[in-house]
Amino acid sequence: MILNYGENIRNFLANRKWVDRIVSKLEKNRFDKIVQKRKKLFLPDNAFLVSNSALIETLKNDGILHLPAYFSFSQEEVEDLQQLLKKNAKEADSVQTFYPDPIPDSLIKLYKDSFIENLINHSRGFSSPKKLLRLYHSTPLAEETGSFLWHHDGLFNYFKVLVYLSSVEIDNGPLAYCVGSNKNNWEYYSYERSRFQDEALNQYEKKYFTGNIGDVIVLDANGIHKASNPNPGYDRIVASLAFVDFDSNQSTDHIYARDNKLSYLKS
Ligand SMILES: [Fe+2]
């Protein structure tokens, strides 16, 4: 009875806009302080800045960058990753997903890619201490929820690198992004208030990122984005490398990073 009462109070408070605003503000202040510290530690490479200024500016201004055919994978590597997903993935947030541990050999080049990491670091002015690799398989959904609704992932610069491991046409459910929405200072991070209706985002160009196996998409997940729902008979397989900066319970990536749940985070 007392437990239920406590639960009810929590639910009541969690749904209040003013509670959400206070919690979000406190979280944002905490993140800002950590980011400021990380910015002081970052030493930019001027030669890199100059030779890649166009890509860095695109990432800064648009919040997203498409690098077609950045990686190549053999047919066998792709099939192995698809098998690995089928064997290990569990449903979470409307997709089949898991964190491969250790990192599969074919994806070590993604995990260790210094060019992409440098693009991210130079576009936001700091580096991330932890990277986490996750695999996703999306199949058609009867109801679009979770990451299939327009949303942002947090209140801070949270970057992800996606690599398509299947060919992604409009039927397969490409990643969609509101170009430039990363520059908005989002105030709330609760599930309800970090989700948006299509009509509420008319000021942005909504881009759908179709592509081929090996295409890379770098995104600031603090901009508004969503995974699109594949049409019946279609699916999509993607690897995601998340750059995590501080302890938080804001996303599964952050929880896994905080608790060092993967062997390669401990070394
Ligand atoms: Fe997201």
Image (spheres, rainbow, N blue to C red):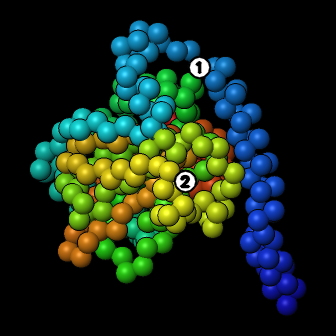
Residue drawn at 44 percent across, 44 percent down: 179
Residue at point 52%, 45% (across, down): 181
**Relative image position of residue 65 (x, y in whole percent):** 37, 37
Q: Nearer the viewer, mark 2 or mark 1?
A: 2
Q: Is mark 2 within 8 Å of ligand 1?
A: yes
- Kind of residue sitting beneath label 1: Phe
Earlier residue among tags 2 and 1: 1
Q: Tag 1, which secondary structure?
A: loop
Q: Is residue 79 above or below residue 92?
A: above
Q: Quadrant of residue 91?
A: bottom left
Figure quadrant of residue 194: bottom right
Q: Is residue 174 left or right of residue 26?
A: left
Question: Is any atom of residue 264 visible in this view?
Answer: no
Residue toward you, 97 or 163 = 163
For the N terminus, which image quadrant? Answer: bottom right
Q: What x and y, as percent, mark residue 143? A: 42, 79
Instruction: Write down the residue under mark 2.
Output: 152
Left or right side of 75 for 63? right
Q: Quadrant of residue 191?
A: bottom right
Residue name at image x 47 percent, y 64 percent = 198
Number of labels in the image equals 2
Residue 247 in the image, given as x and y percentages of width and height: 66, 45
- Give me the C-alpha separation between circle 2 and circle 1: 26 Å
Per the rendering, the mark at residue 96 is none
Secondary structure at badge 2 equals loop
Is residue 191 shown above or below 116?
A: below
- Name the residue rendered at 54%, 61% in the picture: 200
How many C-alpha atoms fall within 10 Å of the one at disc 2: few (<14), some, or many (≥20)? Answer: many
| Residue underneath mark 1 | 42
